[in-house]
Image (tube, rainbow, N blue to C red):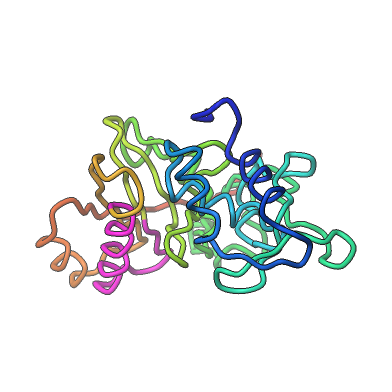
Amino acid sequence: MPIYDRPTKTLMTEWASQHLKPGQEFSKSDVLPWFVQHYPKIKRNTVVMHIDGMSINNPNRKHHQNIKPGSGHDLFYKLGPDRYRLWNAETDGRPTYLSDPKPDALSTLTEEVVDEQDEAGGSEFAYERDLQNYLAKNLQRIEPGLRLYEEEEIDGLEFAAGGRYIDILAVDAEGGFVVIELKVSRGYDRVIGQLLRYIAWVEKNMETSRPVRGIIVAKEITEDLKLAASRIAGVRLIEYEIEFRLRPI
């Protein structure tokens, strides 16, 4: 729900109408002071996410179901790292949307996205996206009370974090943040560094009073990863095993 009487996307459109002319470039640092002055309760990261989410050529838009034609998100065009301008509908092309609901991983196991069948007739997820979509809809299977992070039109699936993307950002039953990193094959010790970087980013850029921890989900947790994680508080390791089977009737 919006903090103020209007959602952030509407306030962003107001800022643009007051500060931008066609073709004029800007960066995130040009937008943030206006929100701090007029709408201080809106978090910095929320403003940043909306700038990217309202850029019609940002590929991450396709992961957000609320960003669709007529929803008020088609405003900017991204020129490069932290460079934007107003979208020109005549020259910039069609906006990126998620035209269909996020697919259930179990229903997208086609010849293009499945691994070879094992002797028992099962097929494992071949791509991280399938595992990601499935877990985002079934976070309670990881931990009771776990849910996908959501704020206005932004959710925690491929959550933008400092130029990189967290596979899943979730919230636990007590309101703490949970960073979930996925590996469709083996999870090695180097994923610890990736996870800790994301945890630190969330602590710095989100609500710092809320605890942040991490979970690594992999098909196989290697011994070196177990050893590395054993020295770090707040990190859980989970192995998955999911199969798709056909049974003649």
Q: Is residue 40 above or below residue 190?
A: above
Residue for point 30% across, 30% down:
173
Q: Residue furthest top?
A: 5
Lateral position of residue 185 relative to residue 237, left or right: right
Q: Residue furthest left?
A: 231
Q: How many marks?
A: 0
Towards the viewer: 1 or 212: 1
- Name the spot of residue 36 as percent of width and height, x first: 45, 45
Lateral position of residue 104 relative to residue 92, left or right: left
Towards the viewer: 240 or 62: 62
- Name the spot of residue 215 as percent of width and height, x first: 29, 52
- Specify the quadrant that holds the C terminus: top right
Q: Is residue 19 above or below residue 35?
A: below
| Picture quadrant of residue 72 | top right
Residue for point 61% across, 30% down:
6
Towards the viewer: 116 or 141: 141
In magenta, the rendered stretch is 181-203
- Name the spot of residue 174 as percent of width and height, x first: 26, 30
- Name the spot of residue 157 as percent of width and height, x first: 50, 50
Residue for point 18% across, 72% down:
224
Lateral position of residue 60 relative to residue 196, left or right: right
Q: Residue furthest right?
A: 90
| Picture quadrant of residue 113 | bottom right
| Residue 24 shown in magenta | no
